[in-house]
Image (cartoon, helix red, strand yellow):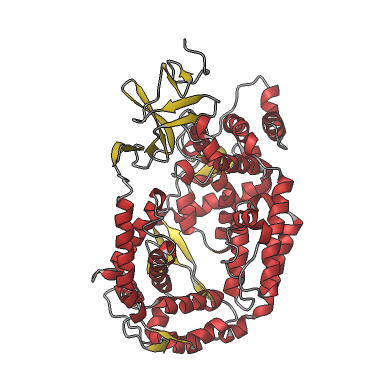
Amino acid sequence: MNKYSSKAVKTAATVGMSLAMVLSNAAPVFAAAPIAVCDGTDDTAAKCKTIFYDLSKAIEKIGLEELNVESEATIDGTDDVRIIATIIVNKAGLEKHLTGSDYTTFRKWMDVVNIIAADTETGKDSKGMFSTAYFTSDANDTEKTGGLVNFYATQLAAGGEWNGSSLKDNASAAVKAYEKMTKWIEDGYYDRLDEKLSNRFDTVYNDLEEAASDYVVSDDKVTDLFVAAWTTVLEQDLDGKDKLDFGKNVDAFEKETKYTSGVTETINLSSKTDIKKRISDIKDAPNYYRVKNEDAVQDIIAQYEDLLDTITDLKDILKTNAYKAYTSTKVEEALTGDDSTVRSIVKKFTDSEDTEKKSASAWAKTLSNEQYEILKALKEDVLDEVYNFETKKVGNYYVDKSGWVDGFTGTSTLKTDLGADAYDIFFKLVDTKEGLFGIDVVMNHLTDFVDAWDAVTTDIEKLTPANIKASDKATLEAAEDAIYEMSNEKGKYVNNLTKSQTKEIRKIQTKIDNLREAFDNLGVTNAAGWYDMGNGNWGYNNEDGTPAAYKWVASGSDWYMIKDGKMLRNTWLATDGGRWYYLDNAGKMVTNQSVDGCWINSYGVYMSPTYNG
């Protein structure tokens, strides 16, 4: 069924790691506790470098590809110290004090360690296989909170989303988890585990394999569909079509690419931003990680990368369409309604607040969505190409590691076209807690504004009081939140609106009010349990206030069936098990009587037209 069986996985991956232990009757020899003296404080800088050089010598001797949880070395004069555990407990100090090539080497180690050992995240937000607590203490409990393996175990256990009847609705997540664990095996990370962790891994992997087996699609089918979908996108980009057209494959290709046929536009082949976005979308596609090593997939990406190489080089960066749009395209200003170039607006920017971040934020609140689009292209096609907006986290704060790209000679032109204040703040780290540069503060606010405008326009465009339904609740609430920020005098986006947008706000507000009234009249309530819908109809909500999709509900000794949040009445009901039930006018399941000449027993199950006992 799958190219791995649980037995084959364990045999192939553990033989090299545990054979000596299996063949030996000797008691295991435990490694020394990890050295933990490089905590990130300034007075441990020298000790951090000592630990780093000892680790570096050991890993170079072993080879990073062969490094595993049980690998040991002499660290800072102590023998038999576990290498991976030492890296974990000294991570903060090494991150702070290492620079240059030493820091690059350390990051390569962490690329391995981060997959094996999660930080403090729990549940689906975990990044690594197991909790760091297993490696940084004397505990031997592999089921400690944290790590994806243990999260998967909770999902498979009783009450989890991948257990019993819940599995069908959550099969996609279970399959992805199974494929992630399989990928860890393929990439050799399973081989790096010690015996306790590999046993825990095996247990969860075997259970997950059994749960997901009926839903896993063969690799060949996945590859064929992926290549067909993205080849279609590439061909239509090259042909210069206005919008993507998936023809008869619309359902499959839309699911594979996350694009909408007839709506998603083809890219501008002269725009680095567009091409990079397309490559990013390919790599973010749901099945990319399963097929990324296939030649056909790499060929598609290579063709987009070839397009990038033909656009421009660094010396011509200020001749790009994005820069020309910034300097010469006129768009409507927010508030005034005047048509001005974005350059003229940016050059008016002044550092007028008590902090540079506040100045950037206040100025962002005066820009329109059209100005945002031009600034976005400027940032992605120009500024990101000539300036490295890099930071490094040290403790709870970020430090500035940014700088101009070697070979760029247009800084004086940029300073002239941005203006002195904008030039100073755009490239400065203005928020050390979040790691934000001035340009990031501006773009983040404008991105939120554009999302808010979409929430009150395109997102509710097809909603009417006649077709709104319970599942539209989140969309309606997002629109209400957004319209408040645009219409209230203290709203975040009031000053981002152009005059033409401001005129639309009243009409939009009316539509949202009408949608809210219609939605409330659906009888939707946030309260859990029963509620009266009128005319003899009753609704039923789950504990979280959402309408129950399909369930039996007991009231005293009587049973009622809920479907799509509403109690069924005066109808026959066929269940998946082939049994038939009848719900009377009050919605109650009928027992011990005949309905339409059909006898129903004491359990509410239809028996036969003649059976009555």
Could you tell whether 515 is left or right of 114 in the image?
A: left
Q: Is residue 602 above or below residue 184?
A: above
Q: Residue furthest front?
A: 597
Residue 71 sits in which quadrant? top right
Q: Residue at 56% x, 75% y: name it.
A: 385
Residue 394 in percent (x, y) is at: 43, 58
* Observer-nearest of 9 and 478: 478
Q: How many marks?
A: 0
Q: Dividing the image into 4 quarters, which one contains the N terminus? A: top right
Question: Is the residue 121 above or below the residue 306 in the image?
Answer: above
Q: Residue furthest left?
A: 489
Q: In the figure, residue 213 lies in which quadrant?
A: top right
Residue at the far right: name it: 295
Q: In front here: 221 or 375?
A: 221
* Foreground of the two, 307 or 232: 232
Q: State whether residue 264 appears in this view.
A: yes
Q: Is residue 317 above or below residue 571?
A: below
For image coordinates 42% across by 41% down, the residue present is: 564
Visible residue check, residue 76: no
Q: For this rendering, which residue is in front, 334 or 377?
A: 334
Q: Is 38 positioned to the left or the right of 556 in the image?
A: right
Q: Residue at x 58, y 70 (%)?
A: 265
For residue 293, what is the image quadrant?
Answer: bottom right
Question: x, y percentage for residue 492?
Answer: 30, 69
Expressed as whole percent of the image width and height from the top left, the position of residue 300 reads: 71, 63
